[in-house]
Image (cartoon, rainbow, N blue to C red):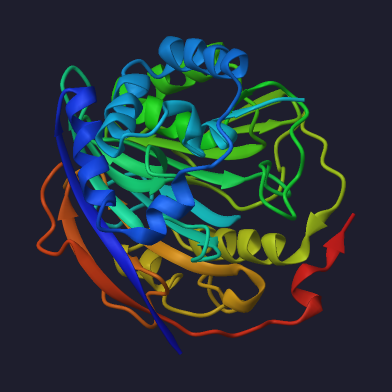
Amino acid sequence: MRVIPAYFSYLEGDSYAVGQEQGEEVKSMVWAKEAWISSNPMGQTRYKELAKVMDAYAPGLSEEIQGFADSLNVEIRALKFFDEAYLKPGGCSLAAVLPSKASDRKTYVLRNYDLSPEISDMRLCSTKITGKYSHSGFSVSCFGRSDGLNEKGLSVAFASCGIPVGMHPGMKKPVSAGLQFMVIVRALLENCKNVEEGIFCLKDMPIGANMNLLLADIKGEAAVVETYDGKMAIARASREAGYISATNHAVLPGIEERGVLRQSKVRYDLIHSTLGRSLSVSKQELRDLTLREYPEGITVHNYKQNFGTVHSVLFDLHAGQLEFSFGSPLENETYSLKVGERFPFKELSVRVPDREYGPEFWAMEE
């Protein structure tokens, strides 16, 4: 059993000041400097292309990153974030339960993020940027977000659709030019107040990621937006069903994926059988999905093969609250945080059970 650190950041001010604040935090985090700063800066032409796209769809983010670079006295093009934020030619479990299905008539979003702790930030941020909606969510490469909930009651959560697209070993090379998921999630959290606005923005964005993106809002609307190799499909949750979910494979008409990880289908079927077997679902029944280890539950301890739960969170949209654990909720404490508020700890210790599930975990189905 390893013990690793996880972090919380409270970020407030204009974009540049928030970037400077994060730069000051990183000065005491040797691992972060090594993970986020490259000795081989991005070329000027490609950087300008990326900055132009980010300014159009995630305004203010370039200023934040500039403040970060200035604080550390490094060239902005040397930040590794840019290698992953825009793509040229993990694993997760997501579910939203609507008021029509929830026993307490609330909207919930359940999310487990499965990855290697070595390439996860292990960092939760409450972010209040001038002129943007405040939000609390988990960071990716410092500036991006994998999921979160904003002050207007919009939750956004990402899962890869098929093998994740990216620059790390084992990931799929991008087919379409466009933004990576971490920029997209943050842009939606900071600029959209409901599902309709989120879908409108997504239809206009250049998207390079293959993803299942779950959006839900406090009004009881939810949708999954699926993108794969330049194609997009959208499914809205019906009030009759009362829920919608996604894991790591394509399920929507119009999206064709070669082969499906069996373990993704197992998690998807488990969520559907749990949420679909009764007329109503309690908050505890939702949480119980994460309190059992795969294949009986959706929490994964396959850390030796870089596929373990790095955070688990239940978003309560009506309460404006996150109930979360860093790492497996079976091994680590669950905490609560109101959107945009401070967390009492800047650093936590996370227990990581280094189990390996064997080659069958990676079996594919047609």
Classify residue 135 by image quadrant. Answer: top left
Q: Residue at x 52, y 20 (%)?
A: 202
- In this view of the protein, can residue 151 be seen by the observer? no
Residue 41 shown left or right of residue 32 in the figure: right
Q: Is residue 356 above or below residue 125?
A: below
Depth check, front residue: 339 or 186 = 186
x%, y% of residue 116?
Answer: 55, 65
Q: Is residue 243 above or below residue 330?
A: above
Q: Is residue 241 above or below residue 202?
A: below
Depth check, front residue: 297 or 115 = 115
Residue 192 shown left or right of residue 279 in the figure: left
Q: Is residue 173 above or below residue 265?
A: above
x%, y% of residue 2?
Answer: 44, 85
**Total marks in image:** 0
x%, y% of residue 134?
Answer: 20, 32
Q: Residue at x 30, y 39 (%)?
A: 72
